[in-house]
Image (cartoon, grey):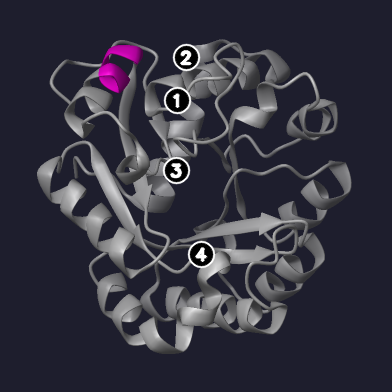
Amino acid sequence: MASAAPNPSWVDTHAHLFLLDDDEASVLERAADAGVSWLVCPGVDVATSEQSRALSARFPESVLWSAGLHPHEAGQWPLVRDKIAELAQEAAAIGECGLDWYRNFAPREEQIVAFSEQLELAAELGKPIIVHCRDAFKDVHDLLKTTDLGERAVLHCWTGGSKWTKRFDELGVTFSLAGPLTYTTGETLQYAARFLPRDRTMVETDSPYLTPEPLRGSPNEPAFVTNTGNALAELWEMEADEVARLTSDAATRVFGSPRG
């Protein structure tokens, strides 16, 4: 990112830069101008994990990357297991991976195997894991409960209500909030977010998806993470710069930092 970030300084913990139409340099420059210090670019399969690695190499002070297989592609796991494991040695994190009982693009049994083995990989390497959980709270919880990942398990785009927020919080995981926190239909999430642990909560965009209010209708991008951060500041009844500090500290503790 070319320009110095003003205060408050945010971290976007989940942005698929390789899916954005605009060139990455422009996207990152706009993010810096909005106060975003750096971001995590997660892969969803071998090809995009390699793309994320290349982007991190191009923008080493702005981008960390992860390697993983998304649950939609879980049927590929036996074919790509070794390559994902190889990439994971170098990546900052494992994922995006998890369970998706909403789309069910892959059989549940295949999703469970792929996710379980990526959890094992994260534990073996001592790295964080970025977890996709859609309509699968119980099964994701049960699998995470068998691990000792704690805050290194990052619940990407958390949308759970009070019940599941409390149950996952007991596992010591990290919660990452995205655009749905700003939606008028997000009352259940907004209520639960008030009780999220202040030291284990982060913010993200999930670019180019889930654009926050009032920007819905346009593709999401890292600069817009400030909208979610400001919404969280209102719910926590804190100043935005304090929430930026808390969420950025959590991101740095979990993922490290591209700036050392």
Residue at label 2? 241
Q: Secondary structure at mark 3?
A: loop
Q: Residue at x 24, y 62 (%)?
A: 50
Q: Quadrant of residue 106?
A: bottom right
Q: Position of residue 65 (x, y in %)?
A: 30, 53
Q: Which mark is residue 245?
A: 1
Camera-side residue of 18 and 153: 18
What predominant SS class does the magenta segment belong to? helix
Looking at the image, residue 229 sits to the left or right of residue 64; the answer is right
Q: Secondary structure at mark 4?
A: loop
Residue at label 3? 14
Residue at label 4? 70
Residue 207, placed above or below residue 221:
below
N-terminal-most mark, 3 or 1: 3
- The amino acid type found where label 3 is placed reads His
N-terminal-most mark, 3 or 4: 3
What is the span of residues highlighted in magenta in the rendered image?
A: 30-34
Furthest residue in direction right, as rendered: 163
Front disc: 2 or 3: 3
